[in-house]
């Protein structure tokens, strides 16, 4: 039977200053700004999408940057670390690059046989780069990051929970995930078990709940092929007692949302239609793109948004 869910689609964070956000993810990390739009649920706020050349599912890290937002805090009921995949042998390059731009970075760590480094962005959002030879995606760069060291997309994400049993049941019985293994209190799950679909659970029984604001993850989205498979997922989840939203049109995919038992907001998003439906592939991310319902208010919306620009040449 074909899996309805095939891995991670995107991960969305709350951020602070919009320009600092663009500078970090495009300038320092070398991701492509593939879409510059608004938060459909809070139109006075940008929604940035960063990813590979086309913003393929499994590569896209997105942000809601709120100017002046206070710092959030990591804790139970949150995705605490987003892990990106890089080629084996790339960590020395990344350690040197991150230090060059004033980013504090951990020593090399080892997890499930792969080496990784850990650091935080300008808003204290937790990030990991995991070096491995299991990822055949090519990655992308504006040129300031050599393509052989470029970020290929997601490796996975770490869920910080007070208990794992009900979330594990959700993943393995209703979301096409399987248990892969445990190491040092970290429980790993995957669909195919390769970069782009990994979900780790860390248990913090007495941990205080995280506070969502700048530097924290708003939600994690999982991939499904199309609208038909999404409806199958929705039906399966609802039949098993999960409170799932109606299908929401996000222009570049459609989405359903629900809370997993530990409190993290889960989304299931379609691979279709993608980010090239309203911009040429060569010009993705250059203009502020609005959903049709927001176009009549474009002038007012653009006036409310702080102007931003790419500064990748400053991060060579």
Image (cartoon, rainbow, N blue to C red):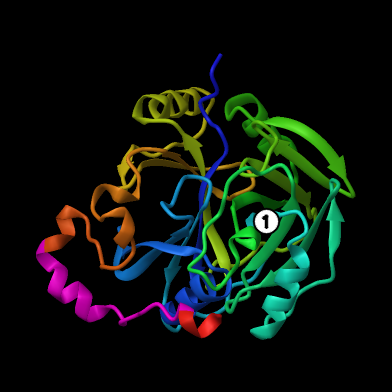
x and y percentages locating residue 118 in the rendered image:
74, 66
Name the element at disc 1. Answer: strand
On the question of residue 76 being in view, the answer is: yes
Residue at 86%, 47% (x, y): give it. Answer: 113
**181 lies left or right of 135:** right
Question: In the rendered view of the protein, which quadrant contains the C terminus?
Answer: bottom right
| The one of 314 and 165 positioned closer to us in this rendering | 314
x and y percentages locating residue 197 in the rendered image:
62, 40
Q: Which residues are magenta?
A: 296-312
Q: Which residue is the site of mark 1?
A: 86
Residue at 75%, 49% (x, y): give it. Answer: 132
From what the image shows, is residue 138 above or below residue 148? above
| The one of 196 and 170 positioned closer to us in this rendering | 196
**98 lies left or right of 32:** right
Question: Residue 79 falls in which quadrant of the image?
Answer: bottom right
| The one of 126 and 85 positioned closer to us in this rendering | 85
């Amino acid at each position: 039977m074909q899996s309805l869910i095939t891995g991670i689609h995107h991960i969305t964070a709350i951020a602070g200053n919009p320009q600092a956000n663009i500078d970090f993810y495009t300038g320092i990390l070398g991701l492509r700004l593939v879409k510059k739009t608004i938060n459909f649920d809070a139109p006075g706020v940008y929604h940035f999408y960063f990813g590979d050349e086309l913003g393929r599912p499994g590569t896209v890290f997105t942000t809601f940057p709120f100017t002046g937002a206070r710092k959030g805090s990591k804790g139970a009921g949150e995705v605490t670390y987003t892990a990106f995949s890089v080629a084996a042998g790339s960590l020395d390059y990344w350690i040197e690059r991150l230090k060059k731009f004033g980013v504090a970075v951990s020593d090399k760590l080892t997890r499930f046989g792969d080496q990784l480094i850990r650091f935080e962005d300008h808003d204290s959002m937790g990030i990991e780069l995991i070096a491995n030879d299991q990822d055949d995606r090519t990655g992308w760069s504006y040129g300031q990051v050599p393509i052989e060291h470029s970020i290929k997309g997601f490796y996975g994400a770490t869920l910080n929970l007070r208990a794992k049993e009900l979330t594990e049941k959700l993943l393995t019985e209703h979301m096409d995930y399987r248990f892969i293994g445990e190491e040092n209190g970290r429980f790993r799950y995957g669909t195919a078990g390769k970069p782009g679909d990994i979900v780790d659970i860390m248990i913090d029984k007495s941990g205080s709940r995280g506070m969502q604001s700048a530097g924290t993850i708003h939600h994690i989205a999982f991939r499904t092929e199309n609208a038909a498979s999404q409806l199958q997922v929705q039906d399966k989840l609802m039949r098993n007692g999960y409170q799932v939203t109606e299908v929401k049109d996000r222009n570049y995919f459609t989405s359903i949302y629900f809370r997993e038992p530990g409190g993290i907001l889960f989304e299931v998003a379609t691979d279709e239609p993608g980010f090239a439906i309203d911009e040429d592939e060569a010009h993705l991310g250059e203009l502020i793109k609005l959903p049709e319902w927001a176009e009549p208010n474009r002038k007012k919306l653009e006036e409310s948004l702080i102007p931003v620009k790419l500064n990748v040449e400053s991060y060579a």
